[in-house]
Image (cartoon, rainbow, N blue to C red):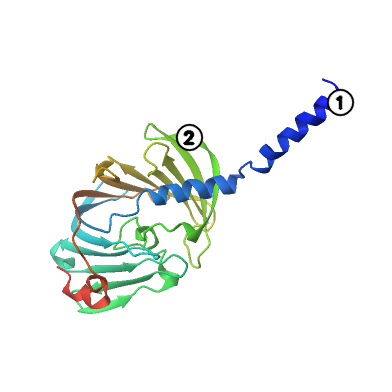
């Protein structure tokens, strides 16, 4: 190729190079897309079992139900109520997730008839003895992380994008999270959590997705495995119901004491 042709080819490449996505831009785009496909459900209820397994395979089961509500321009609000076993029946957890400020969380201890606020520096603590932390059960908000596309990959036999999430909020229990996002349904299939020493701590699997309202996917099971302790916690979901006409008053602190 002669010199003028080389110059022309280089000039033609300049616009393409100018618009090439960085790994950070692609990661952010994928995360935003994943969030956007799960907007508009307004509110939902569900019942589920929490199955806790120790490293020897011994299991403990708890029955729970919850309700959630979308909040425009902010994170979701949710209440979880324990139905069994008897010693924690009526215990309730309230979460107000926020986009760009610390989440607000409270725990109502029925046996003490007392509401306990969960402090920001305790969000990495275990939720009711499970392998889920208080941090894990907040709704995902894009602005709380730095995003970076790592690679294409597979999880549970599905083609996925693998995106690294670096928490930007204070008191996170994680240095990073790796999330496998399904290329077809844009929902998370797998998440790896790394502790403050940057060691692989836990893996969360989202299993048995089903579609509701022809739009919104929900899993039948969320399985959290702690690689450092050998413990596991599974959340087995059922009876999703949408369109409950909740209001914000259904998710205020006083609602904890009324929760049934």
Q: Nearer the viewer, residue 32 or 224?
A: 32
Q: Quadrant of residue 17?
A: top right
138 with respect to 65 (left or right): right
Q: Position of residue 158 (x, y in %)?
A: 39, 33
Task: Compute the Cα span from label 2 to label 1.
Answer: 42 Å
Query: Residue furthest toward the right?
Result: 3
Query: Residue furthest toward the top?
Result: 1
89 with respect to 128 (left or right): left
Chain-order first, disc 2 or disc 1? 1
Q: Position of residue 203 (x, y in %)?
A: 40, 46
Residue at x-position 43% and y-position 42%: 181
Q: Examine the rendering and report whether any part of residue 56 can be seen.
A: no
Quarter of the picture containing the C terminus is bottom left
Q: Quadrant of residue 109?
A: bottom left
Q: Nearer the viewer, residue 246 or 218?
A: 246
* For residue 68, above or below residue 178: below
Residue annotated with mark 2:
153
Q: Badge 1: how crowded within 10 Å, few (<14), some, or many (20+)?
A: few
Residue at x-position 23% and y-position 78%: 254
Residue at x-position 27% and y-position 75%: 252
* For residue 232, above or below residue 106: above
Q: Position of residue 152 (x, y in %)?
A: 50, 35
190 with respect to 255 (left or right): right
Q: Badge 2: how crowded within 10 Å, few (<14), some, or many (20+)?
A: some
Q: Nearer the viewer, residue 177 or 37?
A: 37
Quarter of the picture containing the N terminus is top right
Residue annotated with mark 1:
3
Q: Position of residue 35 (x, y in %)?
A: 41, 51
* Contact check, label 2 and label 1, Cβ < 8 Å: no
Q: Circle 1 sits in a helix, a strand or a loop, which is it?
A: helix
């Amino acid at each position: 190729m002669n010199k003028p042709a080389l110059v022309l080819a280089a000039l033609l490449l300049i616009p393409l190079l100018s618009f090439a996505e960085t790994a950070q831009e692609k990661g952010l785009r994928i995360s935003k897309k994943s969030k956007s496909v799960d907007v508009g459900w307004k509110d939902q209820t569900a019942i589920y079992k929490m199955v806790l397994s120790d490293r020897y395979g011994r299991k403990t089961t708890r029955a729970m139900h919850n309700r959630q509500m979308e909040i425009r321009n902010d994170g979701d609000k949710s209440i979880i109520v324990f139905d069994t076993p008897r010693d924690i029946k009526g215990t309730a957890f309230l979460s107000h997730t926020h986009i760009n400020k610390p989440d607000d969380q409270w725990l109502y201890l029925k046996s003490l008839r007392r509401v306990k606020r969960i402090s920001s520096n305790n969000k990495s603590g275990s939720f009711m003895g499970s392998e889920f932390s208080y941090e894990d059960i907040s709704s995902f908000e894009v602005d709380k992380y730095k995003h970076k596309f790592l690679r294409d990959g597979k999880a549970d036999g599905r083609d996925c994008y693998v995106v690294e999430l670096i928490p930007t909020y204070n008191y996170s229990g994680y240095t990073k999270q790796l999330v496998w996002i399904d290329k077809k349904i844009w929902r998370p299939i797998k998440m790896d959590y790394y502790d403050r020493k940057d060691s692989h701590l836990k893996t969360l699997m989202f299993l048995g997705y089903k579609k509701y309202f022809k739009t919104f996917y929900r899993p039948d099971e969320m399985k959290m495995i702690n690689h450092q302790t050998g413990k596991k916690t599974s959340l087995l979901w059922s009876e999703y119901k949408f369109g409950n006409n909740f209001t914000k008053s259904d998710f205020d602190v006083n609602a904890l004491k009324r929760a049934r």
